[in-house]
Image (spheres, rainbow, N blue to C red):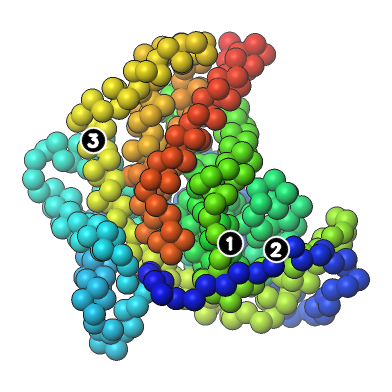
Amino acid sequence: MSTEGKRTWTVDSTRSARSIDELDLHDIRGRPVLKFVTAFVIGAVFFLVPVPYQGQVTVPFDIVVSTITEGAPNAVGVYSLAIIVAGGVLTTAARLGSPTVAGYDLSYFETSTAFWLLRLAGLVLAPVMFFKLGPAWLHTPGTGGLMWGTLVYSVGVIIPIGAIFITIFVELGGLEFVGTLARPVMKPLFKIPGRAALDSLASWVGSYSVGLYVTRNVFEQGGYHKRDVFTIATCFSTVSIGFVGVVAATLEILDLFPVVFAAYFVCVVVTAVILVRIPPISTIPEEYIAEPDPEVAFSGGPTEYVRLALSEAVKKAEEGESFTAAATRGFVDGLKLTSLILGTILAVGLAATLLSANTPVFDILGRPLTPVIAALGIPDAATVAPATIVGITEMYVPVLLVTETALKAKFFVAVLAVSQLIFFSSVGPMTMDMFSDVPVRFRDLVVLFVMRTVVLVPLIAGLTHLLAFLGVLG
């Protein structure tokens, strides 16, 4: 997905806001309104409507993904193997200068040398993991078993399935509607377009994989510039609501799930408000890789925003393709994107989890933090301190370290682990590979992980003590 040598655009960011009377609103006609409403309802039901399932409450998207990955793990394994191999082979063909294979344009698979090598590493590792070759320590539940049987399988299924419904929602007016209504919050607080609310929502209710797919899609259509993308990818590629529940259940604090989730939400908002205003995010250029399509500068009250949102949504629905065409294109795009990133996730994620499980690196790095954690009044500081660092490898690892600690320590690590966002078993390599044209660099992600942790540790400690004072963590 390289864009080396390609043109970039910039736009004037000082445009004056216009009122509702100065805009040419689209006519509200029955057929496009029905098209938009149908697409909106389909997307909302699939991603948002809670339903009971196997004794828990979840959303249809999670049920579909779980049914596929748990009901047909062998088929998912064969599919994962095939798509990783395909990504490595097609990237190699594009890298060696072949413009097409059997008439298929390979420019989509062009990338830097580093990511070509990572995809090749994934190509080699995929058969090893699928056939369980090599030493036993490579396939333990916390390393290879986690990467292959959980993360690779989940991401491999989530992206193409999620892309079907997200594309229907986005292409038939949902992005314009949600984005317009969210502008008064997203722009002043986070310095990103209102439409970025959909990317964040897709991460919250579905998966960061789906959220990043939305971001990539809008970026390629000129809806975001590079700083927007960098901000969204590093501040809003959140862990899903469902996975927060998994974390709470693992630590046996599921009864505190609403409190854990509320604290998580506060942490994501506070860190984003701070980090978007300082380097490295603030130094990313406001350049577009496609003809810019920025949101119209607008000023008005709630009623005017609703009118504009409906106008923009109906216009998009009228111009958009059919449901079948949108769903088909979304599925194909999802498969293509999966073939690009799944090998990279496997290679980087396996290395990160092996480093965490088999070396004392993170224990050593965590030791200087022990007195800091203790000074903040968090119990079991010697156990909690490494957990504040090891999350950079995989966000679930810190949770496993503190299963036998005090309630306040469990709460502290549960909220911290899901709020750090940047981890190299999945989000890190996925972001770098998908947005190599921004570019998102390894060192920037490490710096942002550290910065997030510096902000989050005292913030979550304060929330922990406040909740304890109120008797919630009694």
Residue placed furthest toward the left: 134
x, y (%) of residue 436? 40, 61
Dot 3: few (<14), some (14–19), or many (≥20) neighbours within 10 Å?
Answer: some
Q: Earlier in the sequence, mark 1 or mark 3?
A: 1
Disc 1 residue type?
Glu
For label 3, the residue is 355
Name the residue rendered at 74%, 63% in the picture: 14
For label 1, the residue is 286
Q: Nearer the viewer, mark 1 or mark 3?
A: 1
Element under disc 3 = helix
Disc 2 residue type?
Ser
Disc 3 residue type?
Leu
| Viewer-side residue, 87 vs 139 | 87
Q: Is residue 204 visible?
A: no
Q: Is residue 23 left or right of residue 58?
A: right
| Viewer-side residue, 123 vs 324 | 123
Name the residue rendered at 42%, 12% in the picture: 371
Q: Earlier in the sequence, mark 2 or mark 1?
A: 2
Name the residue rendered at 35%, 78% in the picture: 107
Report the quarter where the N terminus lies. bottom left
How far separated are the C-alphas under marks 1 and 3? 36 Å
x, y (%) of residue 411? 51, 22
x, y (%) of residue 174? 66, 65
Mark 1 in CB contact with mark 3 (< 8 angstroms): no
Dot 1: few (<14), some (14–19), or many (≥20) neighbours within 10 Å?
Answer: some
Q: Earlier in the sequence, mark 3 or mark 2?
A: 2
Element under disc 2 = loop
Element under disc 1 = loop
Q: Decide: is 205 above or below 373.
A: below
For label 2, the residue is 13
